[in-house]
Amino acid sequence: MSYFVNERGYYGDFGGAYIPEMLYPNVEELRQQYLNIIHDESFQHEFKALLKDYVGRPSPLYLAKRLSQKYGANIFLKREDLNHTGAHKINNTIGQILLAERLGKKRIIAETGAGQHGVATATVCALRGLECVVYMGEVDIKRQAPNVARMKMLGAKVVPATSGSKTLKDATNEAMRDWINNPIDTHYIIGSVVGPHPYPDMVSIFQSVISEETKKQLLEQTGKDQPDYVMACVGGGSNAAGMFYHFIDDENVKLIAVEAAGKGVNSGFSAATTLLGKEGVLHGSRSILMQTPDGQVVEPHSVSAGLDYPGIGPQHAHLFKTGRGKYVSITDDESLNAGLLLTQLEGIIPAIESAHALAYLEYMDLKADENVVVCLSGRGDKDMETYMKHFNL
Amino acid sequence: MNRLQQLFKNKKKNILSIYYTAGYPNLNDTLQIAEALEKSGADFLEIGFPYSDPVADGPTIQASSKQSLDQGMTLQVLFDQLKDLRKTVTIPILLMGYVNPVLQYGVENFCKACAETGIDGCIIPDLPMYEYEEMYHTCFEEHGVSNIFLVTPQTSEERIRKIDGLSNAFIYLLSSAATTGKNLDVSADARAYFSRIKAMELNNPLMIGFGISDKKTFDSANEYASGAIIGSAFVKVLAANGDIEENIKGFMKEFMG
């Protein structure tokens, strides 16, 4: 069975390009060119150089000794939190800005929830001197003032999305509307493995550097390039897609994706898409999404803005449906406790998103010689207010 | 031949189609608005079934969709509201909306409900041509439901020919690549684009939509197509104070001269 995209843009039953005709030329142009551009030698050269010298890659694979002791197995952390701008998001924006330049685009648009992808996009636009417009829910703008200020300082225009629930889903709608109205000169940098084909594939290719490096680093550190488990949190699913990529066909490596249960799966305030969702179409692809029986998209909830999305990427839907990946969920409280635990055992304050992946270690039945890689997708600086409130710091 | 195909057979010019959102301004206004529009001279109607994330729509239709959903509109409620449609309304009716509600209703059930209710066709902007051909075409044809495709200034000639081959009622020509509710700018570019499509001599008649708001833009559209579609401008009329039927009559009068 293939776990990767086919020539029609599908992963099994999921994917495709469910877009209005107004977006067809843009998406078709991308579809026809993305692989040629990405595989071009000059692109690869420039992409790798920027990842190394600008982002600071390779990111370390760190054997967390005290955490390992606690869980009775070898826990490795893939340190995406050490990247420039503080998360894995920059891997994708570097790739897409180089691609946009090669497509001759002059203007970049993006959506953002917590602001991490917005900052990563504004950063590469500043780096390359391109106009940048970031759509962000009005509610999120109020919640994430420091990231809004960072984007503005980087020269981006931050446009509030005032429709619907005024959060990530609506920011994505607004970015798509912008693209419909500016079909010629604009490239839309989607921040996750969602959207119409070829976005899920393209973003996962740019994020696949995570598992590519992990394989090499594991071989150096353990003598084997396959761990027993790889784990990552999933909102739309971009860090998980990158963490899984080079392990997907290694059937003896177990893939664990951790969704946000919010206040509890059955609380009505959750973002556990695979548990609560059904197959449907959102933002241009067929996948699994949280919706009413009538097909209206339901508002998710998570303490972590990066996981607060009602869908998952189509590849994740496929990995879930085929059983290749195990999809589990962790509550707000569990994730915050896991964040505190990592901080106190290892001196690393993780993003609350990444803390969801760490929290699932509690539920695993690990053996002493097993190797586990957890993608530490981002750092916790942006989450200090939430941590402070929760723990009365 | 359904009502829509019949209409285009009998009328070649100045066809006026009106879009409005079902369940707006009040949940149960849907049928009454259709009746009032037929009385005021509309040639056919597009009834929008609302979706939570209407990416192709501008602020006016976003707002009407949200209000309609908040008031409890679903596809099932809509089919129930329209069950006696054909007792009072004779003009062709299309449903317009996004693909996810149709998927959840079930494509087969949807086509069946359209046929039973007397719906002649539908417009689903985010249903791509390939998926339509593979999974929907047969079902639509079996139930006599015409699927309407959109064409924009950026749509290639090859693709337009393909769309023409898959269409059996009319082709929806977007005045520009834009979300709904922008005003039509009948620029030299737009005229060149309309002329280019007209010169292709397609099998299907053309209707121009997006940005048609008054008699002037309606008349310009008619120079190039069989008629035009008014959406956001009409939804604004529904939002206005006063008697709905009177407001509709007042709006439609302009086009009936």
Image: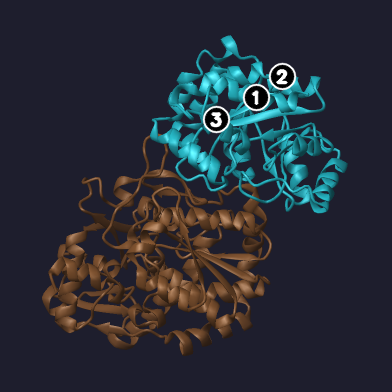
| Residue occupied by mark 1 | B250
Residue A388 in the figure: left or right of residue A61? left
User: Is residue A261 visible in the rendered structure shown here?
Assistant: yes
| Residue occupied by mark 2 | B1
| Residue occupied by mark 3 | B238
The chain in cyan: B
- In the displayed structure, A89 sits above or below B178; it is below
User: Residue A188, located in which quarter of the rendered image?
Assistant: bottom right
- The residue positioned 17% from the left and 61% from the top of the image is A333
- In the displayed structure, A362 sits above or below B17; it is below
* N-term mark: 2 or 1: 2
User: Residue A355, located in which quarter of the rendered image?
Assistant: bottom left
| Marks 2 and 3 belong to one chain | yes
Residue B232 in the figure: left or right of residue A217? right
Residue A349, percent across and down? 23, 78
For the residue labelled by badge 2, is the local secondary structure a helix, a strand or a loop? loop
Of badges 3 and 1, the one in the foreground is 1
Farthest residue toward the right? B199
- The residue positioned 45% from the left and 22% from the top of the image is B28
Distance (Cα) linking label 2 and label 3:
32 Å
